[in-house]
Amino acid sequence: MDKLEFNNKKQCGLWLMLVGVVIVLSDIFGGDFLINPIVFLAGYYICFFSVNVNKKVRKKLSQGPLSKFQIKMIYVSLIMLFVLMFCIAGPFIPGWNWRLIWLGVFLATAIHFIPWFTIHGFSMLALAMVDIIVCIIGYAFPEVSIKVIGYVDAITKIILGTYLFFLSKPSAFVFRGKAKDKEQLCKEG
């Protein structure tokens, strides 16, 4: 693999905007849960199936194919998300510490954006770093409301999603290393 092509930024942008709106609504209707898990999960899955599973939407928004490697990375990042949520947020579920549960969910989500670089490009690393910093602030300063953390997380996703959907163009990342070109490798191999 010599390069990664990022052809599905519009789909990712729509997904991020919708998830950001879901987080805002979950935050507004949080109640005793601080961020409403029913609104969050229902909205998350409706948006997921509407954007990421819907073949018509994917085809309309795609500006080129994903590689087999990128498809594998989608699965790796999703598995990573659920493992991280279990490890970071899971320990607080028995005590129903909603603040730490939600911080764990937000942190797990932020970390799982790192391998998304291979799918959608450098913007995913920026999103991951901003969201990780927001979570660290949430852990370091317990007086900062989880609702504020939720709104900041949502706004970050909406802003980046808007950029990806409306302004971003397909791009590529070319691996530059000391590797020899394919012809030379074939001759030597």
Image: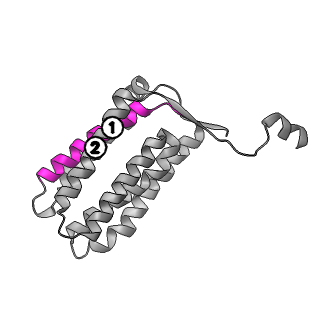
Q: Is residue 74 left or right of residue 103?
A: right
Q: Is residue 34 magenta?
A: no
User: On the image, numbered disc 2 is attached to which residue?
Assistant: 19
Q: Residue at x 43, y 50 (%)?
A: 113
User: On the image, numbered disc 1 is attached to which residue?
Assistant: 161
Q: Is residue 11 magenta?
A: yes
The quarter holding residue 179 reads top right
Q: Residue at x 54, y 41 (%)?
A: 70
What span is in magenta?
Answer: 5-29
**What numbered label is drawn on residue 64?**
none
Q: Is residue 39 left or right of residue 11?
A: left
Mark 1 falls on what kind of element? helix
Whether 79 is drawn above or below 119: the answer is below
Q: Residues within 10 Å of mark 2 (few under 14, many from 20)?
A: many
Q: Residue at x 25, y 75 (%)?
A: 94
Q: Decide: marks 1, 2 in contact (CB < 8 A)?
A: yes
Question: Which image quarter holds the N terminus?
Answer: top right
**Magenta region, mostly helix, strand or loop?**
helix
Amino acid type indicated by mark 2? Val
